[in-house]
Amino acid sequence: MTLVKQKPIVPPTQINEIMYAMWPAQALKAATQHHLFEALDKEAKEAGEVARELKLDVRGTQLLLDAMVSLGFLSKTGDKVYKYQIAKTDVGEQARTYLIPKSPLYMGPWFAQGEELGKMWRSLPECIKSGKAVMEVNKDLQAEEIFPKLAEAIFPNSYATAKQVATLLKTDKIKTEWLVLDLAAGSAVWSIPFAEASPKVKVDALDFDAVLKVTKHFTNKFAVQDRYAFITGNWRDVQLKENTYDIVILGHILHSEGRDVSKALLKRCFDVMKPGGRLVVAEMISNDERSGPVFPLMFALNMFLATTEGCVFTESELKDLIEEAGFKKPYRLAPDHVVVIAEKP
Ligand SMILES: C[S@@+](CC[C@H](N)C(=O)[O-])C[C@H]1O[C@@H](n2cnc3c(N)ncnc32)[C@H](O)[C@@H]1O
């Protein structure tokens, strides 16, 4: 094949950046699986010491340690023979917080779920052709099968943000009791920070029976179980009293449901909330043109694979839906934040 002379050939930079993105992900998983970060938690060590301690191949360990330095999780000092340590940076702190098994926010289970999602994503070409999802997590039976593990695995992804939300709503300053409804609670990641912020917070956590076992595990782990009540079942069937809740949380549930069911769910939240109460919606949100950011648009494909109706709303669509349910002044916490808050007048 002859290449057209006049036109300069662009290098496949963006294509390769995307294609090679799997390598750092696999390297990070291998480092975590082999407890590299745990081995360096207390002190700096040479590659040989780490390999001996973890019973790994020395050359492979050395290469993996250097790869983790390149990604910013570790730093190294020395001359020819190096000592490695967890970097004293924000990225190093992420390794300490999320990649060491004894940490309450350890992400090992999320990495394992990532493997499951990877299997689902391999069906993307077929699904784009057929229009059929690989699974239907919006149906009760599949939800009860899939969500106990998934809800547990995603806890570390949201906890830091959920803490921010509880702080922004000044939960620690409340003078009277707040009743919070965590609807489709999963691990209760969005409500636990409210309960941690004030002993005046009580939470009703609603989810399927199989998932509530996970909810209970996390409320015990964070020592807030005495402030929780558990409501078993599908939110569509459960009867909740009107004008009851100060805060209603919808954490990563609307995207499974599609537009019409989301509308009904938001109306239900409106009815059970006290006047003056606040709605907290955590979602993947795209820009109004659906041209970015990358993650929500990839997540929309994820929902296409995993549900019959699931979707990612644009910021305007989400705010409109919230307002149509009767809430006022929906606002996003920051331009790229995952949380939208609104009030019941
Ligand atoms: C993606 S998880 C989110 C869990 C948690 N809120 C979070 O943000 O990590 C969705 C949760 O919604 C629950 N769920 C889905 N459909 C539901 C329904 N119809 N009634 C009650 N819970 C439901 C699932 O069991 C699961 O725990």
Image (cartoon, helix red, strand yellow):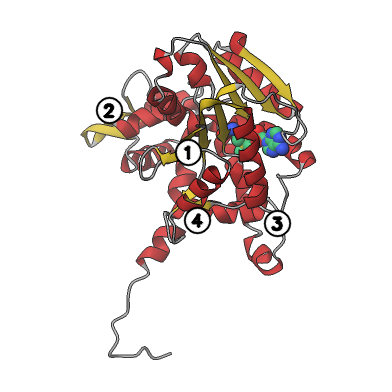
Where is residue 84? Give x, y as percent.
31, 30
Dot 2 lies on which element?
loop
Work out whether residue 65 or residue 113 is closer to the camera in this orientation and state it: 113
- Residue 91 in the figure: left or right of residue 280: left
State the separation of the CA atoms marked 3 and 4.
17 Å
Report the residue at 35% width, 28% height from top.
Answer: 93
Q: Amino acid at mark 4?
A: Leu
Report the residue at 60% width, 24% height from top.
Answer: 181
Residue 47 visible in the picture:
yes
Q: Amino acid at mark 2?
A: Lys
Q: Amino acid at mark 1?
A: Lys
State the separation of the CA atoms marked 1 and 3.
35 Å
The nearer-to-camera label among 1 and 3 is: 1
Work out whether residue 142 or residue 242 is closer to the camera in this orientation and state it: 242
Give yes or no for contact between labels 2 and 1 (Cβ–Cβ under 8 Å): no
The dot on residue 328 is 1
State the separation of the CA atoms marked 1 and 4.
27 Å
The dot on residue 133 is 3
Where is residue 212? Give x, y as percent.
70, 24
Residue 22 visible in the picture:
no
Badge 2: residue crowd in 10 Å (few <14, some 14–19, many ≥20): few
